[in-house]
Image (tube, rainbow, N blue to C red):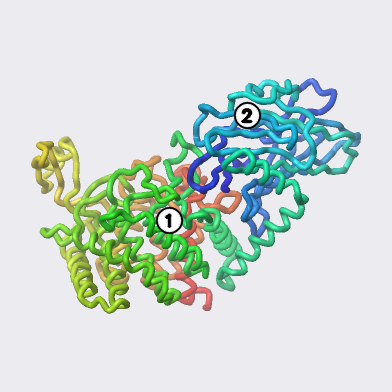
Amino acid sequence: MLASLGRTGRLYRLWWPHVDFPQHVDEIRTGLKLDHSTSGTVWFDDGDDGWQHRIAYVPHTNIVQVRAEHPSFPLAVEQTDYAVPGQDFLVRAYKIDNRSAEPLSFTFVWYASFRIEESALYNTTLFDETNDAMVHYRHRYFFAVGSDRECVGFQCGSSREQAEHAWLNGNDIDMQPDGALVWRIEELQPGESFVLPVYIAAGHNRQEALDALAHAKSRSVSEWRERTTDDWHQYLRDANRAPAGVDPAIAEAYERSLLTFRLMADERTGSLLAAPEPDEQFSRCGGYAYCWGRDAAFITTALNKSGLTSVSEKFYEWALSAQEPDGSWQQRHYHDGSLAPSWGLQIDEGASVIWGMWQLYEHNRDAAFAERMWPAVAKGAAFLAGYIDEETGLPLPSMDLWEERKAEHTYSAAAVCGGLRAAASFAELKHETGLAGRWRDVADRIAASIESLCWNEDAGSFYRGLKLKVDGGVYAHAAAQGLEGKAGRTAKGYEHYELRHDPIVDISLLGVSIPFNVLPAEHPYMQRTADTIAGLLHVEGVGGIKRYENDGYIGGNPWILTTLWLAQYRVRNGQLAEAYALLQWAAAHRTETGLLPEQIDRVTGEPAWIVPLTWSHAMFVLTVSMLEEAGYWAK
């Protein structure tokens, strides 16, 4: 179970039984109604109306606390949210403080509108009086809401307006997605507190959800919190901590990254989530609730460095189920292994999976793991080796890692080279010398083509790619400027245009060295490319590195992962001080809860777009690990 909260503590999204899909919540609100007050329910999770909020993770855990106070309201609320490991319920505990000089009686108001399976259609809400629970359900997903304290009122369906005044009509069932509950607190004395836990329990049928709720109620909320705290502490004890001597901000961001990895790992399947998707309309983020093999390869390598290899291994066991019959891995998947919406093949995805498998094997030398991976590696490498343009020696055109253009991309070629070399190493373990030699030959040809065909001397950088597919208008404009290209028709007679080179400078060009080691970091081409990137892609004012020249996505903000990509190259090239400065920039641009976003607003310097992005956290851990291995903190 995964939940997404805003900074006022409002719960926006709830995923179960996988952390990617489906999502079930439309809106959950919490408020207080003072006796003898004519103002109605006061919603303390409101970001306006004078309420002040402080949000933070409880140190060394994924337990979230929000303190809500209002200068003219006599009650303050400390809200604590956590999913209990191994259980199918979420705990929301509300500690209400009487800050006045008088005893206070009041009503606690809970309003919930579910959107089960991400649909507002055919939801049903009912009140189960025997179990004192509100049940929301649709199809095979049931959610039971209740507390260890009996509620005093309820309403199923059309309850938003009544919740504003805590006057609920007792309707016990409705084919509407919303419902409300109220609890009474009598005579809370000045300076005293009252704790009301509310549990959201899930099941695939009504009885499962009610049983999960009954289990939640069977123990005190303090016991659940202690158990959850102990679990997170043990998780961190099992991991490698930040190096001794690092700045506190670096150590905190490193630990938060480790904690975030577990939130993004699906315990049922082993799949890894790129990011939770809080906005399915994509007005403030972009569709991230899937598993990308490329992201996962970076994430698992970071997990390896963190000592969390069991999470990596579980991912690669999952990856076996997502491989296509032809040996490829497609762009992205749901966590149940099914194919997610796609822009088409990204050849680097499957290459990255094979490369990542070898990184894990090199880390722990588990022969049984290599044996289990071998059939998928052999099929995957055969696909990669067969997906080669005989004219260039590079992989045939596919979508780039940003999913924006089709070409024979330099980064994709580097990934395929890395994947084939990893596959050859697996083949050598199996004494398959013929396969190992064949795959290394293809990889070596790719490496030679990158060095000879993809270098742009005029720009002091690699070309982003060759044979860039464009539309007719772009092609005509390029031709007028004297750029080389080719026009023709497809087998079905459609017009096809391509440019010989894609000259745009892109951070992913560092992939030739980091992480795929096609060319060493000290190669003059790599050094010049990195310096060109640092000059052209640096964002003035706010700092950081954007993805590529003239990046139009969300205005061309700097990204955390791109900035850390340059940092990793600097480490590999021996420029440790420059690398550390970039790492500090990333740590300084965390959210107030310590999470790393995808982007930083180029004007305000505030976190932008999706939060958290697991790839950002992986790059942070990898950069710290590389600096440690280079002896930076040993000085």
Between label 2 and label 1, give the one nearer the viewer. 2
Looking at the image, do the residues carrying marks 2 and 1 touch, with CB atoms under 8 Å apart?
no
Measuring from the top left, give residue 449's x and y in whole percent.
17, 64
Task: Tell me what residue is drawn at x 50 percent, y 36 percent.
Answer: 117
Q: Which mark is residue 561?
A: 1
Residue 244 vs 560, above or below: the answer is: below
Measuring from the top left, give residue 561's x and y in whole percent.
43, 56
Measuring from the top left, give residue 282's x and y in whole percent.
44, 36
Asked if residue 500 lies left or right of residue 319, the reply is left
- Label 2 – label 1 distance at C-alpha: 43 Å
Task: Tell me what residue is drawn at x 38 percent, y 50 percent.
Answer: 546
Say few, some or many: other residues with alpha carbon within 10 Å of mark 1 (under 14 / 14 to 19 / 20 or more): many
Say few, some or many: other residues with alpha carbon within 10 Å of mark 2 (under 14 / 14 to 19 / 20 or more): many
Question: What residue would you read off at disc 2?
Answer: 125
Asked if residue 474 lies left or right of residue 39, the reply is left
Answer whether residue 619 is visible to the viewer in this image: no
Residue 369 placement: quadrant:
bottom left
Tag 1, which secondary structure? helix
Answer whether residue 269 is visible to the viewer in this image: yes
Residue 516 placement: quadrant:
bottom left
Measuring from the top left, give residue 224's x and y in whole percent.
72, 53
User: Which of these two is toward me, 31 or 16?
Assistant: 16
User: Which of these two is toward me, 435 or 354?
Assistant: 435
Task: Tell me what residue is drawn at x 31 percent, y 58 percent.
Answer: 350
Asked if residue 99 lies left or right of residue 173, the reply is right
